[in-house]
Image (tube, rainbow, N blue to C red):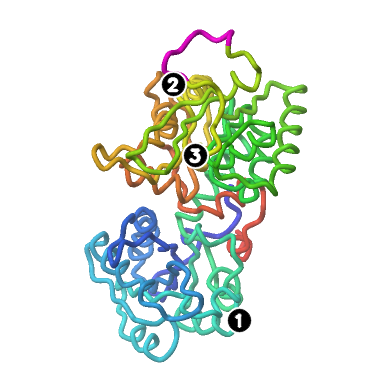
């Protein structure tokens, strides 16, 4: 149960509220490519406006490195927020200073003002008390609702709470409650599917799930490092040589778990390869297991099946169909699935069909989670690349909870404290 005060626990009527949202959304020029995070903030905004507050919203976008860079302006967010709220959203091209104070002084109750990008000031990421105090001077109450940033101790997540009564928004509460509940009281069997590029980015999460889950599936480019650590050929595929010892240690830990309880650690045993990341290039399927066990002759003859070796010039770009079917089949016995990271190079699309040639493993996973094969587990999804893929393909509504936080969701799943949550008032 969420232990911090929320906007439902305090009297807000007639107050000026500073809301920290996470509007770090992808842009294509000056257009928003994915407004999922903006939409997820609306419940908190609607609640605050129902209390007749003067609402100031602050956020960051991208990495402008502490300098004003209009390529990272939040002005497009103000335009989209206006469309979603169906009411005026004022915008001021700064987040502190006289111009901002003047804009705040003109706010009436029930009105909304969005400030410019916090990260145009280096003091934001430096957790500057002085910068936080300037932000705090604009309002009477601070509301933290940017789940995607609460794993950072920044001025708008940590220092600001030293100057204002500080509580959580409804999105933050929902994110923390959902993830904490899944990690502490999962409806078993629990399957964790972890993709992405580097093991180091998710090592704590992998260790946590080896201890907690009933099955752990590894995909994406990080699977190449695991395969390499076990003596498989990965050709020219992306992998991290420095992480080979880490991969071996993880596999040893997984093996020890399998000896004491019912537990499976699943790596791809067939893969899709090509000589170039290009939708026009031919692909082939490589049966890794056949080669590694020297059992090619014992396999049924498959005319279109490759021998079992990834050639030197080839890249592993997706899990293979047999691995995908195996994972989807195992998922039929899972009651909870936590998924973080795509299983292949889903960014590449076919110009003819719009379907990615290296997205089949990820698509099969989506279909299985969505219940297409008969059973639909509770699903918790996180990770920027995963959420972007689901959003681009209009798949978000197939999942029980799609997190707005990348790093924050990883930290929370791994059992770490989140500075931006810890700084809020206790109930």
Q: Which residues are magenta?
A: 297-305
Give the mark nearest the N terminus, 3 or 1. Answer: 1
Residue 217: % across, % down: 58, 32
Residue 260: % across, % down: 77, 23
Say whether residue 302 is magenta: yes
Quickly name the residue at label 1: 129
Q: Nearer the viewer, residue 100 or 320?
A: 320
Residue that appears at 39% across and 71% down: 72
Q: Nearer the viewer, residue 294 or 413?
A: 294
Quickly name the residue at label 3: 380
The secondary structure type at the circle numbered 1 is: helix
Q: Viewed as shown, does residue 33 lie left or right of 313?
A: left
Residue that appears at 40% across and 20% down: 373
Q: Residues within 10 Å of mark 1 (few under 14, many from 20)?
A: many
Q: CA distance from mark 2 to mark 1?
A: 51 Å
Residue that appears at 41% across and 28% down: 364
Looking at the image, residue 79 lies above or below residue 248: below
Residue 44: % across, % down: 40, 59
The count of marks equals 3
Looking at the image, residue 320 lies above or below residue 229: above
- Quadrant of residue 155 in the image? bottom right
Q: Viewed as shown, does residue 59 lie left or right of 287?
A: left
Instruction: Single out the residue that lies furthest toward the front.
Output: 312
Give the mark nearest the N terminus, 3 or 2. Answer: 2
Say whether residue 83 is magenta: no
Looking at the image, residue 193 lies above or below residue 133: above
Residue 62: % across, % down: 44, 67
Q: CA distance from mark 3 to mark 2?
A: 16 Å
Quickly name the residue at label 2: 375
The secondary structure type at the circle numbered 3 is: strand
Q: CA distance from mark 3 to mark 1?
A: 36 Å
Q: Nearer the viewer, residue 68 or 100?
A: 68
């Amino acid at each position: 149960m969420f232990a911090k005060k929320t906007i439902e626990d305090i009297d807000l009527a007639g107050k000026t509220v500073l809301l920290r949202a996470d509007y770090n959304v992808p842009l294509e020029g000056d257009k928003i490519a994915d407004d999922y995070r903006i939409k997820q903030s609306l419940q908190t905004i609607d609640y605050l406006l129902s209390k007749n507050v003067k609402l100031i919203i602050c956020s960051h976008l991208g990495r402008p490195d502490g300098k004003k860079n209009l390529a990272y302006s939040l002005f497009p967010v103000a335009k989209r927020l206006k469309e979603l709220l169906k009411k005026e959203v004022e915008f001021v091209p700064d987040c502190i200073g006289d111009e901002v104070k003047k804009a705040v002084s003109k706010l009436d109750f029930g009105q909304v003002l969005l400030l410019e990008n916090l990260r145009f000031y280096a003091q934001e990421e430096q957790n500057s008390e002085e910068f936080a105090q300037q932000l705090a001077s604009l309002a009477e109450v601070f509301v933290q609702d940017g789940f995607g940033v609460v794993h950072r101790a920044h001025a708008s997540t940590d220092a600001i709470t030293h100057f204002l009564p500080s509580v959580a928004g409804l999105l933050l509460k929902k994110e923390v409650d959902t993830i904490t509940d899944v990690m502490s009281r999962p409806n078993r069997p629990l399957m964790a599917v972890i993709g992405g590029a580097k093991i180091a980015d998710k090592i704590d999460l992998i260790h946590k799930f080896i201890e907690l889950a009933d099955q752990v599936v590894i995909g994406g480019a990080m699977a190449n490092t695991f395969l390499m650590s076990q003596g498989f050929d990965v050709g020219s595929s992306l992998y991290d040589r420095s992480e080979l010892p880490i991969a071996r240690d993880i596999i040893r830990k997984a093996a020890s778990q399998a000896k004491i309880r019912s537990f499976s650690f699943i790596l791809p045993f067939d893969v899709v390869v090509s000589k170039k990341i290009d939708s026009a290039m031919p692909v082939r399927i490589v049966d890794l297991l056949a080669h590694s066990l020297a059992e090619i002759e014992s396999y049924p003859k498959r005319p279109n099946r490759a021998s079992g070796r990834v050639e030197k010039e080839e890249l592993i770009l997706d899990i293979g169909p047999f691995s995908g079917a195996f994972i989807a089949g195992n998922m039929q016995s899972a009651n909870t699935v936590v998924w973080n990271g795509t299983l292949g190079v889903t960014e590449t699309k076919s110009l003819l069909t719009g379907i990615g040639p290296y997205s089949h493993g990820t698509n099969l996973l989506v279909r299985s989670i969505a219940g297409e094969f008969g059973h639909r587990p509770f699903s918790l999804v996180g990770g920027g690349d995963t959420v972007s893929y689901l959003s681009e393909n209009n798949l978000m509504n197939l999942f029980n909870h799609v997190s707005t936080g990348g790093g924050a969701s990883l930290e929370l799943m791994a059992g770490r404290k989140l500075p931006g949550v810890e700084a809020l008032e206790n109930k």
